[in-house]
Amino acid sequence: MKRYLLIFAGMAILLLLLVGCMVGPKYAKPSAPLAPDFKEATDWKEGDGWKKAQPNDAPLRGKWWELYDDAKLNELEEQVDPSNQTLKIAEANFRQARTAIRFNRAAEAPTIGTSPSITSIRASANQPYFPSSLANNGSGEFILPLDLSYEIDF
């Protein structure tokens, strides 16, 4: 009996492997007719007011704001660059101070914590190689621990 089961399982696995290797029908690209007034890209002409695009982003490198010829803008941009690092340092110091305040104030209030859990298990008599005498209708647990801590400072 075991031998037939092994042969059957081997045949089933072989069949699955062969089915997985099948390829669908050969793909044929559908033909789509071209529009009757289609022109090649080289035949297109520029209309009135249109010209070919000529990307030129080289002038935008470096001090791009000087394109506007605005003295006030140039003056403001020169002030921003060195101030930027100072502003980043001030912002980092502010965040560090805020974190220290939160850490020190954390002990001023009570701390409440919980981690509830629900579990259930049911042993079925229909399992293979399982004694039916050990089967049950199931059992479950609901656990609700609660932690409360507060440090009194005199």
Image (cartoon, rainbow, N blue to C red):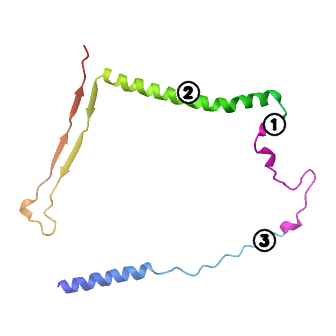
Q: Which of the two discs, 2 and 3, sits closer to the camera?
A: 2
Identify the residue at the far right of this view: 48
Identify the residue at the far top of this view: 154
Q: Which residue is mark 2?
A: 90
Q: Which residues are magenta?
A: 38-66
- Residue drawn 77% across the image and 39% down it: 63
Q: Which residue is mark 1?
A: 66
**Location of residue 86 with respect to 54 vertically, above or below:** above
Q: Nearer the viewer, residue 63 or 138?
A: 63
Q: Which residue is mark 3?
A: 34
Count neighbours of disc 2 (C-alpha within 10 A) and say few if under 14, some if 14 to 19, many if 20 or more: few
- Residue drawn 16% across the image and 66% down it: 127
Give whichever of discs 1 and 2 has the lower sequence position.
1
Contact (CB < 8 A) between labels 1 and 3?
no
Identify the residue at the far left of this view: 133
Task: State yes or no: residue 44 in magenta.
Answer: yes
Q: Quadrant of residue 144?
A: top left
Q: Secondary structure at mark 2?
A: helix
Give whichever of discs 2 and 3 has the lower sequence position.
3
Q: Nearer the viewer, residue 7 or 132?
A: 7
Q: For marks 1 and 2, give the CA distance.
A: 29 Å
Amino acid on which the number 1 mark rests in the picture: Glu
Amino acid on which the number 3 mark rests in the picture: Leu
Amino acid on which the number 2 mark rests in the picture: Ala
Task: State yes or no: residue 39 in magenta.
Answer: yes
User: What secondary structure predominates along the stretch shown in magenta?
Assistant: loop
